Image (cartoon, helix red, strand yellow):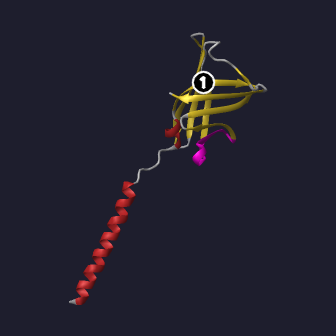
Amino acid sequence: MKTITTMKNIFLLLFFTTLMFACDDKDKDPSPELSAQVAGNYKVTKLTVDGVDQPLETAKATIIVQLEKFSSEVVTGKMKVKIDGVSEPDEDLGTLNLKSVGSTGVDIYEGTQKVGNIKSNKLSIFVELDGSEIEMLADKQ
């Protein structure tokens, strides 16, 4: 009789232990994919070419960078530009790879070259184009 009671206690302990660990996994929210975290429209607030600020207001220019989810760690990008209310042809930025860098946000790569970073809904892009160094800062809309 004592053996049956001991076995029941062991089975109850195993049952509750299993139940406790099974519930713990279901309560955790899976972290969102990197592409889902960064996808969206970003309005450029500052444009610098070769270290010189280019006043967007003076040219009545609006630059929007659109990032769309392609896969869990890849987005596609487009840049839409309006100058004095007139839309320019969209610039295809191609596929961009994402890499989480912890507290410093998410780095953006074109191939193996780092071209930007997103942290707290702020996008920084830095590229070299036709011999000029271009930096853009943008806020998520």
Residue 63 vs residue 122, the one in the foreground? 122
Give the quarter of the image for residue 128.
Answer: top right
Quadrant of the image occupied by residue 62: top right
Expressed as whole percent of the image width and height from the top left, the position of residue 39 reads 51, 34
Query: Which residue sits at x=57%, y=33%?
Result: 122
Q: Name the secondary structure under disc 1.
A: strand
Residue stretch in magenta: 98-112
Residue 127 vertical position relative to residue 63 in the rendered view, above or below = below
Residue 99 % position (x, y): 60, 45
Q: In which quarter of the image is the N terminus?
A: bottom left
Image height of 30 relative to 52, above or below: below
Examine the structure image and report whether residue 21 is included in the region drawn in magenta.
Answer: no
Three-letter residue code for mark 1: Thr
**Residue found at x 47% / y 45%:** 32
Residue at x 63%, y 33% (from the top left corner): 124
Count of marks, rendered view:
1
User: Which class describes the residues within 10 Å of circle 1: few (<14), some (14-19), or many (20+)?
Assistant: some
Q: Does the magenta stretch include residue 106?
A: yes
Q: Is residue 135 left or right of residue 35?
A: right
Residue 138, horizontal then vertical, whole percent: 59, 28
**Residue 59: percent from left, percent from top:** 64, 12
In the visual, does 134 lie left or right of 86?
Answer: right
Tell me what residue is drawn at x 31 percent, y 70 percent: 16
Q: Label 1: which residue?
A: 45
Q: Which residue lies furthest to the right in this view?
A: 131
